[in-house]
Image (cartoon, rainbow, N blue to C red):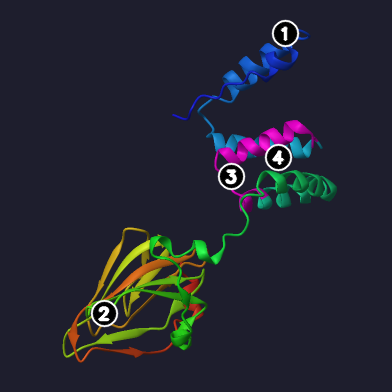
Amino acid sequence: MSKKIVQTAGRDQLGGFAPEFAHYNDDVLFGENWNNQDIDLKTRCIVTMVALMSSGITDSSLVYHLENAKAHGVTRAEAAAIITHVAFYVGWPKGWAVFRLAQEVWKDEDEVKEEQHGGMFGLGQPNDAYAQYFVGQSYLNPVVGQSGVHIANVTFEPGCRNNWHIHKAQKGGGQLLLCTEGRGWYQEWGREARELHPGDAVEIPAGVKHWHGAAKDSWFSHLAVELPGEDASNEWLEAVNDETYNALK
């Protein structure tokens, strides 16, 4: 159950002048209606945003409900999409007015800088040396390598993936992926793609044709652990075609 909504604005501001109105505001509207469990709080916040915008209300009450929506999980991207959608139905000027308020409410959710991606092992540098084997931008941050065990943190921008490839070795070899951030995909030739999330691990035997990368709408990072093998090498093959990739959700 969500944390109970408690409101005192009615009594704080109008208790002496309009106690009955204050009662309806604090005890019924917020005390009962907002605590009804038939609609989750995030959805209720969105409905309220839409109702106030439709009514042309752009004063402090809308600011409160925008802040409330943010506090209950509405992201800046979601808020922008909601306001844009509603503006088509209730009027473009209302959209402009609400956006001016929403920009202030979500101003701390500026586009995440590249340095903030990469998870706990860091973003690293653009993976220029292997760019020809990737669709989209990837980043590489070596973790260890001097001991003979090579581990690097690989980060993919949304939509980025590497080409089909094979880890080859006369004996042993292969690769281990340890997912650390975002959402991505791994697929072996002839098999269904596997969706990946932080905490997932993928063991890739030598000789298996495969690819991995980010989902269309998410950054994705994983540790790539090169498993020791004799005469180990990589064979880079064709890119993952758009039809195959775009079919993934």
Element under disc 3: loop
Q: At 63% across and 40% down in the image, what residue appears? A: 46
Residue furthest left in the image: 171
Where is residue 50 drawn, in percent x and y? 70, 40
Mark 3–mark 2 CB contact (< 8 Å): no
Q: Which mark is residue 146?
A: 2
Give yes or no for residue 68 being in the magenta stretch: yes
Query: Which secondary structure type mostly characterizes the magenta part of the structure?
Result: helix
CB-based contact (under 8 Å), mark 4 and mark 3: no
Q: Which residue has dot 1 on it?
A: 19
Residue matched to label 3 = 74
Q: Is residue 224 visible?
A: yes
- Dot in front, 1 or 4: 1
What is the span of residues highlighted in magenta in the rendered image?
A: 57-79
Camera-near label (1 vs 2) is 2
**Residue kind at label 2, given as amino acid type:** Gln
**Residue on which disc 4 sits:** 50
Q: Nearer the viewer, mark 2 or mark 4?
A: 2
Decide if residue 170 is on the left or right side of residue 248. Answer: left
Q: Looking at the image, is mark 2 or mark 4 earlier in the sequence?
A: 4
Q: CA distance from mark 2 to mark 4?
A: 58 Å
User: The residue tagged with tag 4: helix, strand or loop?
Assistant: helix
Q: Secondary structure at mark 2?
A: loop
Between the C-alphas of marks 1 and 4, the distance is 28 Å
